Image (spheres, rainbow, N blue to C red):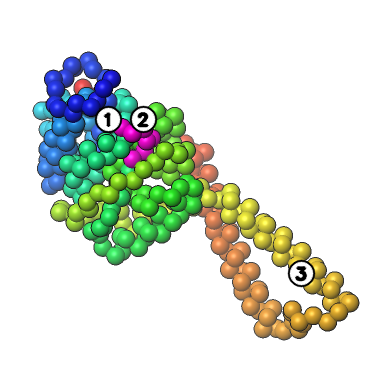
Amino acid sequence: MDWSDTKPREKDEGEQPFFSAIVTCHFEEKSIEEFFAKLSAALEGIGRPYEIIMANDGSTDGTWTKLKDIFARDPNVRVVMDFFKNAGQQAAVTACVREARGQAIILMDSDLQFDPAELPLLVAEYDKGYDLVSGYRKNRRDSFTRILPSKLANIIMRKASRSTMRDFGCTFKIYRASLLRGFHFNEFHIFSNVEAIAALNRIVEVPVTHYPRKYGKSGWTFGKLWLYNMDNIMLLLQRPFQYLAGICMLLSILFVLRVLTGFFVDVRILSEVTNGLLLNILVVVLLTLCGILAVIGEFCVRSHHRLQRSPGYVIRERLER
């Protein structure tokens, strides 16, 4: 079908949506109406059939009431849901992805730090055949305490996904839906940008405007960012342990060669083993072992929770059209 004509058109109620716009909300009572008006205008302007799926991630303000009002008055909003408790943005995205019927999935935050009016910029790139079009914040308007751990997270996520993306944390993206469906994300297998991006080749980033947060504060605390970084470190476990094993093997071989060489010739390398040298080596070894044990412990705890089959989120109420 030719989508070159982007003028708004009449919609067929039984028509399969091209876009599924996913909106996650956490204490967005003050911003959700303004955001929704802008998102609807942007989607109407694109002129393709669409649906909107919205999740309230455990907010205890009036966010859920606002979502139910939006659902009642706009037939393009197909599903809204409310979580029993805050489960995190990735869990909210997971619940929405499971409901999505479109060929392409749009991810957006509802805190007005991104402008839905820029959505056509991403759509234009998606139409070129990319499987992921991601915005990147060219002038980020966040506090230093948000930016610093985010930069660390980007480094970890680039390594974990073997990707060169510059801004993983930008929650303004268009995914090809068949990719996300292929992972079968659910309450026991939470959506991960890193996991999805690691399976992609055709990716492009588009500069988007980033605005200061108008209302409230971000749900991404330092603690949550730390936990999210740990999630991505878990994806890196196989390679670091392989590298560590290789380094240990190499050092062992070099040490054996040094000992053997000492029987035949005088060498300058470690010519005298002092108590200070031994103490320094013991401290380094101890700290390294503690770090490795901490990572192994994290892995064991996560494996235990996974075996217990504890859901990542539980839906309290769900409305579907």
At x 58%, y 64%, the residue is 290
Which region of the structure is painted magenta? 127-133
Left or right: 87 with respect to 71?
right
Residue found farthest to the right: 264
Marking on residue 255 = 3
Image vertical order of residue 17 relative to residue 63, above or below: above
| SS state under label 2 | helix
The residue identified by callout 2 is 177
Q: Name the dominant secondary structure of the magenta segment.
A: loop
Is residue 125 or residue 283 the one in the foreground? 125
Left or right: 59 with respect to 130?
left
- Tell me whether the residue at label 2 lies in contact with that at label 1, contact meaning CB atoms closer than 8 angstroms: yes
C-alpha separation, residue under disc 2 versus residue under disc 1: 9 Å
Q: Which amino acid does label 1 sit on?
A: Ser
| SS state under label 1 | strand
Q: Quadrant of residue 310?
A: top left
Please indicate, yes or no, whether residue 140 appears anywhere in the rendered image.
yes
**First in sequence: mark 1 or mark 3?**
1
Q: Does 89 lie within the magenta span? A: no
Q: Quadrant of residue 3?
A: top left
Please indicate, yes or no, whether residue 71 appears anywhere in the rendered image.
no
At x 58%, y 54%, the residue is 240
C-alpha separation, residue under disc 2 versus residue under disc 3: 54 Å
